[in-house]
Amino acid sequence: MIPTNSIGLVATQTFTFAEDAPFVLDSGATLQPVTLAYETYGQLNAERSNAILICHALSGGAHAAGYHTGDEAPGWWDDCIGPGKAFDTDRFFVICSNVLGSCYGSSGPTTINPATGKPYGLGFPVVTVQDMVRAQVKLVDHLRINQLFCVAGGSMGGMQVLDWAADYPQRLRAAIPLATTARHSPMLIAFSEVGRQAIYADPAWNDGEYYDRPNKPDAGLAVARMVGHITYLSDDSMQEKFGRRLHGQERYGYDFRTEFEVENYLKYNGHKFTRRFDANSYLYVTKAMDYFDLSTNGSLMGAFAGATAVKFLVVSFTSDWLYPSYHSKEVVKALTAVGADVTYLDILSRWGHDAFLLEVETMTGLLTNFLGRLWREERKPYAVNRKPFAANYEKEAQ
């Protein structure tokens, strides 16, 4: 039964562009056509001023809230998107699109290459976070929205938020980057590479050509997910959830079976992941995250020089060791240096990197207050000074 505070049944839509001219990527490669899968929740108001773009993390997709027909579980951020929730769909028009390179309906390695009639595999061009955002700009243009009220997201979603603010500051009023970074550190790149090496080492990967084969590189992808999942937790949360408890036995077996609860948890989540995600997409998306770096000569100030009109809410979590608080503090320091309006909170939490999804009550209060205040402040200027949709925004963004 669908809860009463849910957005209810939703459906994924698609938008295809670059049919007449190729979409040029940061690498210099081109893609034609390009499809983005997306979902929307709530209603766009007459002034087209109440749109919020939600950006997902590594393994997320466009299905951020509500239920698909037949599903038992809602979208990945249903706790925060819906009527009366943090991203209140009684007030806001919420958009979430699947990123380029992923496997949930947007163009990626699983997509059919029109030149061959087969999935791209490694023939799909390498993409960056900036490419993902430029594709989102195309979608926002398609929806005839001049300026987003807010762009929000955590982890890789937060990277997209920061890139929106850096490259398209005129297209948003507010930015909410959560548990994220403006550039991957060597440690983060190292974790990404361990996951990729696990996939490469799986004989079924076959250099990315496995779509027409009976076996997929599930073992390698499962290990990659297990490594990643460890980084999403914290020592405290693992102690609380698992401790040193044994799984299905009372004493050590002195063998190499799964004995500890934490081992069983990782194994279960790793193999569960292979039923919903694609190994090649994992390679592409993690590479995009590793390439992400908004700094110039080691400084972030230049990236945000044009974002002084954007209002920022930057949030980190004390137990997040994947993106420790110093990553967010570097962003805040750069934003403060250029005179941006920035609010920063380093939230005490024991849930590690996943806290932005798990600290529901804290995040609901924080986001509701921030967005509510901005809505009250911005509502009158929007009503008076709104411009009609202009196609030249696309030209300015290039």
Image (tube, grey):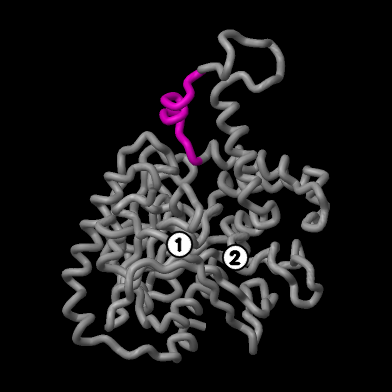
What residue do we see at 81% from left, 49% from top?
214
Our reading of the magenta stretch's main secondary structure is: helix
What residue do we see at 36% from left, 79% from top?
170
Q: Is residue 333 visible?
A: no
Q: Which label is found at residue 129? A: none
User: Mark 2: which secondary structure?
Assistant: loop
> Was residue 243 drawn as part of the magenta stretch in this picture?
yes
Between 235 and 387, the one lying in front of the other is 387
Answer whether labels 1 and 2 touch (C-beta < 8 Å).
no
How many numbered tags mark residues here?
2
- Above or below, 63 against 26 in this view is above
In the figure, is residue 14 to the left or right of 304?
right
Q: Is residue 367 visible?
A: yes
Q: Amino acid at mark 1?
A: Cys
Q: Quadrant of residue 358?
A: top left
- Above or below, 377 against 244 in this view is below
Question: Gap in Å between the C-alphas at discs 1 and 2?
Answer: 15 Å
Q: Which percent across, then down, holds residue 224? A: 65, 43
> Was residue 190 drawn as part of the magenta stretch in this picture?
no
Q: If you read the primary sequence from the N terminus, does the residue marked by circle 1 or circle 2 appear first?
A: 1
Residue pointed to by mark 1: 55
What residue do we see at 34% from left, 53% from top?
80
Q: Which percent across, then down, holds residue 225? A: 61, 42
- The magenta region covers 232-244
Q: Which percent across, then down, holds residue 341? A: 26, 65
Q: Amino acid at mark 2?
A: Gly
What residue do we see at 28% from left, 78% from top?
45
Name the residue furthest top.
Answer: 251
Q: Which label is found at residue 105? A: 2
- Above or below, 296 against 239 in this view is below
In the figure, is residue 321 to the left or right of 8?
right
Between 130 and 115, the one lying in front of the other is 115
